[in-house]
Image (tube, rainbow, N blue to C red):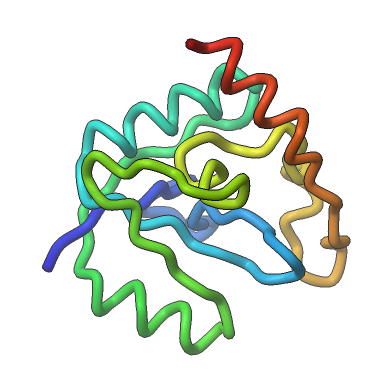
Amino acid sequence: MNIFVLLYNFGTEKEGIHSIELKGRTIVLMFEDKDDAVRYCGLLEAQDFPLPSVEMISIDEIRDFCTKLDYECKLVEKNFVPKTPEDRLLISPPQKNLEVETWNEEECKEENIDLNSIKENLEKLL
C-alpha cells in the first residue's frame, strides 16, 4: 500500500521527514489521502513553518524507517475524524514547532503541547 508523507529537502542530502512530538515520542504522519497531506502542508505554511513536499511512498518503507529509529508512525485515514485531543494533532499541526536549527537530535528538547490552545485554534477554523 502506498501512502503520502511530508518531506523536507526532498532528494537532497538534507532530506528530512515531518514528524510531531507527543508524550516524548516522535510520530511520523502517514496520509492515506493526498488531499489531506496537502491540507496539512497548508496549515504548516500558515504557521510560517518551512513548506514540505507531499511524496508517495510504500507504507512498509516508512514502517521500517520508523522501527529503525524507534519512532512511531500513525496512519491518517481518508475522512479521519479525531476522537481525542491527541488525535487532533494528526490533522492539525501543534502551535509550537522546533526551529530548523534544532532538528539535530542532540539539540532537540521535549516540548509541552498545549492541547487547549490547539483546540481553540481549530474551533476558530470552523
- Residue closer to the observer: 120 or 1: 120
**Tally of numbered discs:** 0
- Residue closer to the observer: 24 or 114: 114
Residue at screen point 45% across, 44% down:
82
Q: Is residue 106 above or below residue 75?
A: below
Residue 43, percent from left and from top: 51, 24
Q: Is residue 124 above or below residue 90?
A: above
Q: Residue furthest left?
A: 1
Residue 90, percent from left and from top: 48, 47
Q: Is residue 86 above or below residue 88?
A: below
Residue 122, percent from left and from top: 58, 22
- Residue closer to the observer: 48 or 24: 24
Going by the image, does 22 lie left or right of 110?
left
Residue 3, percent from left and from top: 22, 57
Residue at screen point 61% across, 54% down:
20
Residue at screen point 78% across, 46% down:
113
Image quarter of the N terminus: bottom left
Residue at screen point 60% across, 51% down:
86
Q: Residue furthest front?
A: 83
Going by the image, does 10 lie left or right of 124?
left
Q: Is residue 6 above or below residue 42?
A: below
